[in-house]
Amino acid sequence: MDLLLILAVFPAAWALLMVMLAPTRDADAFGTGGALLTVAGSLLLMSRTLSGEIVTGWGTHLRADVLSSAALMLTSCVFCLASLYAGPYLTASSGHGQLPAGWRVLYWPLVYLFYSAMAFTCLADNLGILWVSLELTTLVTVPLICLNRESRGLEAAWKYFVLCSVGIAFALIGTIALYASTLRLSGGAGSSLSWAFMLEHGAGLDPMFVRLAFLFAFVGYGCKMGLVPMHCWLPDAHSEAPTPVSAMLSGVLLNCAGYALLRIAAVAARAMGHGSVQSVFLAFGLASVILASFFIVVQSDLKRLLAYSSIEHMGIVAIGIGLGADGLYGALLHALNHAMTKALLFLSAGQVVHWHGTKQILRIQGVLRSSRVTGLALGAGSLAIVGLPPFGPFLSEFLILRAAFLSGHTLAGILLVGALGLTFAGFLAHAVPMLLGNPSRGHEDERETANARTVLMLLVTIILALGLTVPAGLDRALKACVSALDWS
Amino acid sequence: MDTHTFSRLVELTSYSVLLVAVAVVAQRNLATSIRLLRLEGFLLAMVSAVIGLYTGESHLFWVAAITFVIKGLAIPSFFFHVMHRIGLPHDAERSLTVPLGLMLASGLTLVAYHVGRPLALASPWITRDVLASSLGTAFIGLSLMIVCRKALTQMLGFLLMEDGIFLFGITETYGMPLLVELGIFFDLIVAAGVTGILLLRMGGDFGHVDVDRLSDLRG
């Protein structure tokens, strides 16, 4: 039985099933049920790869080591939580006339195709297939972003499409160049697009070729990951999308792009040395963190605030990758922490935006009083995202800073501390007035749905638990990922 | 086919692709641009077929046939359809003037030549000189997407860029694995469909497809 192919194709098949049966009334049950199955599937894969086993499928086009299955597991978890949240959200939104009623039938198939494309990205061995599926994530999410028939959504979707497809076209050039470099391998080792093959023969690849390929791929996948200066599409797309889609875009799609980049970087590092590859990550990461921190300070729109914070955190992840093995450990942990925290923030902010009918930060106040659960979730998420203990992101940011100072990148460490400090002040200056104070008239007693309450509390628990300790299984998985990439 | 004829043929068609890309920038009529895009699709199909004949790789004939149908026939027709549905006068859509466009195109070709030089020097293929023309085509498409802030021209630029990358792939590797080529074609079709839908909605909702006038989202 081809486990990997099933894991990647099942969601698409599920989407097809939903289109054919068109269960308007049970669409949410269908959607949520399928999401639970995807989590079960990724857990199954994780249990096999954690011991070091490599699973292959679909000929040799798919391949999963522990890093692939970790990426898939994170994707499926956020996907499942967002799906749990989505059902009541869709009902409430179509009640308010924000979404046309017929769109619910389209929402579910589209998010399942989105998930399927991300699963292919995580499981692909063939870098060509990886590119095709990552490009497909852009194409599938374009209609999701302009789901609310507002002109702003349309504008965001167009800009998203234009910038991301330009960016990712660069990655295709890089992928082709990598393939071309395997054609020139001496000793007739054969040509291949497989990252495992390239990693194995990395030392024999022509460094000049690989350098060009890596730079093109970095610009391409870095654009999709939201690194400065290729980030311009991100705040528009993430802020205009419907709430559960925003959570997935920020929480996991950025990580998938980062995953793709990491695979190519590992090959490039074999051919041209770790130092030059890592300095590229370091430079772009620092630029992202610093620029995003300024935009966070001056932001007036709640969802755009969160989007800029995503750019900042992707920058932190890139810095971690640029700091060698210890930094990579922190970066992977930070990707997990950021995904959970950002999903929590987008889902709770979506609730607040829905109640107030505005995304303007200044017009929202007293969330803690108007709803205990959402207020608590938004508050915990805000404290976590700025890096306060006892939440997960504190731990991973601390590990990355420690790696920076221990590996002698003192300047990078100092710049990172400065930017984090600025973000801390800027973000909380926005968040605190929203949380405290008296709710405006008509918002004194708001209630979230039971699903939303469960999802928000679950996410708060997760980021709290990740802040207190790194569980032994997670620690093992992260260490295995670092050694699988041969990062030093 | 002997090596000499082969390399001359590939060079001739590749340079024609670049020339057609320059021609797209060198006039402001959208309908003509789409016809040029169609010509480019035919040229790309020809390059694949020629390389297939030379190397004897049968899957390249499939690639040539699919390129002919998708890039040569389907996408230009669809583009015409979208343009007529939006109801634009043919020459209303281009913010780049012709002299500026030509200067940009020649500059970008030089950049492509410079970027591709180390690759071309390392390449064992006899057709390595066409590398600059494929990258140049891609860069010209890219610049159309970035400089021209009109949605239809951006779509044109996107398709031109795809053409350039396709040429880069086929002349640099003599054919990617068929599965990957199929995947790229699939993405191209979906992309064309998605942009078509977006353009029609923009035409319907805003009454124009001028990206410069879309400025609600800032900061």
Image: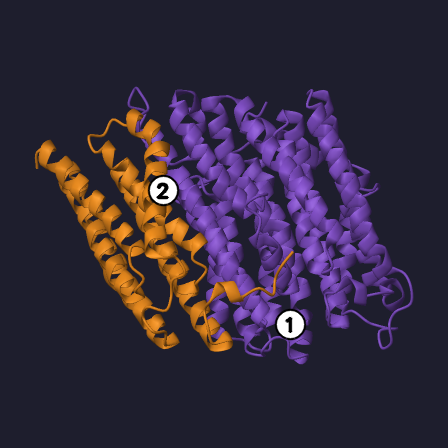
Chain colours: A purple, B orange
Which of A415/A237 is in front? A415
State which chain disc 2 sits on. Answer: B
Residue A213, placed above or below residue A117: above
Q: What's under tag 1, amino acid-wise?
A: Leu
Q: Is residue B38 at least partly visible in the picture?
A: yes
**The N terminus of chain B - image quarter:** top left
Label placed on residue A90: 1
**The C terminus of chain B - image quarter:** bottom right
Q: What's under tag 2, amino acid-wise?
A: Leu
Rendered residue at 29%/42% (across/down): B134
Q: Is residue A11 at least partly visible in the picture?
A: no
Mark 1 and mark 2, same subunit? Answer: no
Residue A74, placed above or below residue B212: above
Q: Where is residue A194 in the image (x, y as percent from the top left)?
A: 40, 35
Residue at image mark 2: B108
Mark 2 surroundings within 10 Å by alpha-carbon count, few (fewer than 14), some (14 through 19), many (20 or more): many
Mark 1 in CB contact with mark 2 (< 8 angstroms): no
Residue B128, placed above or below residue A386: above
Q: Is mark 1 on a helix, strand or loop?
A: helix
Q: Where is residue A263 in the image (x, y as percent from the top left)?
A: 50, 35
Q: Quadrant of residue B15?
A: top left
Q: What element carries label 2?
A: helix
Is residue B96 toward the left or the right of residue A137 in the image?
Answer: left
In 3D space, how far apart are the residues under numbered discs 1 and 2 (Cα atoms)? 47 Å
Q: In which quarter of the image is residue B218?
A: bottom right
Q: Where is residue A312 in the image (x, y as percent from the top left)?
A: 67, 44
State which chain disc 1 sits on. Answer: A
Rendered residue at 71%/60% (across/down): A301
Q: Position of residue A81 (x, y in %)?
A: 67, 58
Label 1 vs label 2, nearer the camera: 2
